[in-house]
Amino acid sequence: MCKNTDINTNVNGCIVTIVKVLWSELILERRRVMENSAHVLGNNQVKKRGRQLKKRGRSKETILYIKSHWQLYVIFLLPALLLTLVFKYLPMGGVLIAFQDYNPIKGILGSEFVGFEHFIRFMKSPDFILYLVNTLKLSIYGLLWGFPVPIILAFLLNRISSSKIRQKVQLVLYLPNFISVIVLCGIIRILLSVNGPLNLFFNTDIDFMTMPSAFRTIYIASGIWQTAGWASIMYTAALSNASKELKEAAIIDGANIFQQIKAVEWPAIKDIVVIQFILAAGNVMSIGFEKAYALQTDLNLQASEIISTYVYKIGLLQGDYGFSTAVGLFNTVINIILLVLVNKIIAKMNDGKGL
């Protein structure tokens, strides 16, 4: 009985001793971890402080360099600044016309201030929704159909191994971009007229230019034909920087053309595509009036009358400068809102990378 009691006492004593040792080890380990953390934090703070001092040193050196060579900066930067101020920022003062009953004789300072009257008048116009919808349809359809075409062309051009053949193909693709918009519209009118080549080829007598349903297709298709080749230059240049080693490795591994594009070529142009898409989406409302006005007829007005042509007719043909400026300002504000929204959406989808 006594032996059993001694054994139990010894066991309990051993357990207590082991627990004490483990507890002391845990405390020591915790102290070590805290000391190491403090040491690391201290090093990080020292490094951060060092970087800040370096930046301050560089900024001071830059300021001293500019002060010692200020004549050089004046000679080269002053003309650019003056041109920017005179031709970019000073004309922004004309936005005040949108809030005035502008009279060219009285000028901006002498014209009567009417506030948001022109904006209200435009939004209450029975044709406001028609003009807005026509503008959005032309822009969005043009973006959806026209934006991928230069990218596809760049991928196809990158597949041409012979540099001579590639240069000749690029020359043919780039030429339409140098055709004037008015000349292009004249060519379209001749091709699609009742007695034009298209009707003669199909033995029909359809006047496409009088059909509202055909206007958007004609406008967008001709735009793609004219600008797609020139727009592909940027993507073609970016594809030239794609890793040739990765491409050769993909070919050796048995990757087909689409797999090579996905794994090697697409990453090389992805960032450029994102930036170009944001800029294109931000200019959704910025359709020039020239082409739409040149392709416009009395019978296709239902589809061809957009905000820019309306501004041209009201502002220049009827002389209502205040109202036309208000409509143009409304168009610009919508563009800015779209640009910001698209940039935020793309940034969320592209790991925070936007403009």
Image (tube, grey):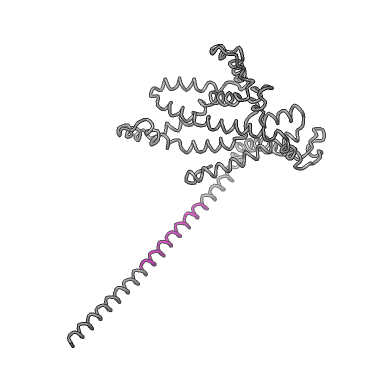
Residue 35 position, x and y percent, is 38, 67
Quadrant for residue 71, please give it: top right
In the image shown, does 96 or 63 lie closer to the viewer?
96
Quadrant where the N terminus lies? bottom left
Image side of residue 208 versus residue 25, left or right = right
Residue at left offset 35%, top offset 68%: 32
Find the magenta span and give its range. 32-56
Q: Position of residue 223 (x, y in %)?
A: 56, 25
Residue 3 position (above or below residue 279): below
Along the viewing direction, whichever of 14 and 167 lies nearer the viewer:
14
Q: Is residue 62 left or right of residue 265?
A: right
Left or right of 37 in this view: 289:
right
**How far across and how far down the image is residue 323, in percent?**
75, 35
Residue 84 in picture, x, y percent from top left? 64, 36
Q: Main secondary structure of the magenta part?
A: helix
Vertical side of 211 occupied by 194: above or below = above
